[in-house]
Amino acid sequence: MKALEERILKDGQVLGENILKVDSFLTHQVDFRLMKEMGQVLADAYRSKEITKVVTIEASGIAPAVYVAESLEVPMIFAKKHKNITMTEGILTAEVYSFTKQVTSTVSIASKFLSSEDRVLIVDDFLANGQAAKGLIDIIQRAGAQVAGVGIIIEKSFQDGRQLLLDAGVPVTSLARIEKFQDGQVVFAPADI
Ligand code: G4P
């Protein structure tokens, strides 16, 4: 998506070997105009799939996911990383290891929000090694629901996430795909949209 690639080139900062800082519009401060446009584009890509729920993981997945959900006119559910005292009944959990952060978190969704009637679109801000999306797929499938696809804002295509998800039989749609970082600059691979 051209507007996103332009914004990454304008405001993104490459940190070290493989991290892109995009806190001015995506992961900390949110540009709602760009976010809404991105939400519509991802929603359009899955509009024919009769999606009933959008699922993401807290925290930075929530903003893009809510705009996708708005455009599809379905609820958005975000998996929680911390146990909440109000989550007392039927919780589905998965262990997610982050190679980037080198921590394992237990993510959970209350089972009452997913059923065998649901066709789910997973949305997240970054796709790196695919562990977060894999954990969500696990939870959704254990609830008996179908995963229609994974919609990503920024994919780091030099990491294994896309392949992991494709191997699990789940289509991936990324608005920007980063082939590599070269001398502190972002080099894009052709995006899906
Ligand atoms: P994976 O889920 O694809 O395996 O990714 P990985 O474990 O490597 O990354 C996990 C966390 O790090 C995610 O945030 C993800 O958004 C973030 N992340 C990965 N690569 C980048 C990057 O290049 N730039 C930025 N800004 N973030 C990156 P999270 O643990 O879900 O936490 P939160 O920040 O959403 O709360």
Image (cartoon, rainbow, N blue to C red):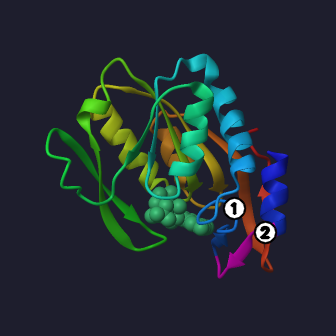
Q: Nearer the viewer, residue 94 or 10?
A: 10
Residue where numbered disc 2 is placed: 11
Q: Secondary structure at mark 2?
A: helix
32 or 106, nearer to the observer: 32
Question: Looking at the image, do the residues carrying marks 2 and 1 touch, with CB atoms under 8 Å apart?
Answer: yes
Rendered location of residue 180, percent (x, y): 73, 66
Is 91 located above or below residue 145 in the figure?
below
Instruction: Looking at the image, tell me whether mark 2 or mark 1 is earlier in sequence order.
Output: 2
Q: Amino acid at mark 1?
A: Phe
Q: Is residue 52 above or below residue 110?
A: above
Packing grade of label 1 (10 A; few <14, some 14-19, many >=20) is some
Location of residue 101 (image quadrant): bottom left
Q: Which residues are magenta?
A: 11-17
Q: Is residue 14 magenta?
A: yes
Which amino acid type corresponds to the residue marked 2 in the rendered image? Asp
Q: Residue at horizontal 18%, vertical 55%? A: 85
The quadrant the C terminus occupies is: top right
Residue at image coords 68%, 48%: 35
Quarter of the image for the N terminus: give it: top right
Q: Which mark is residue 191?
A: none
To which residue does mark 1 refer?
25
Q: Position of residue 47 (x, y in %)?
A: 63, 22
Per the image, label 1 sits on a secondary structure element best described as loop
Question: Seen in the image, is 4 located left or right of residue 28?
Answer: right
Q: Where 51 falls versus 77 (above or below)?
A: above
Q: Circle 2: is it few (<14), some (14-19), or many (20+) Cα within 10 Å?
A: few
Left or right of 122: which side holds 180?
right
> Is ligand 1 within 8 Å of the beta carbon of the residue shown at mark 2?
no
Q: Residue at x 35, y 17 (%)?
A: 117
Q: Give the x, y percent position of residue 73.
A: 55, 25
Mark 2 vs mark 1, CA separation in Å: 8 Å
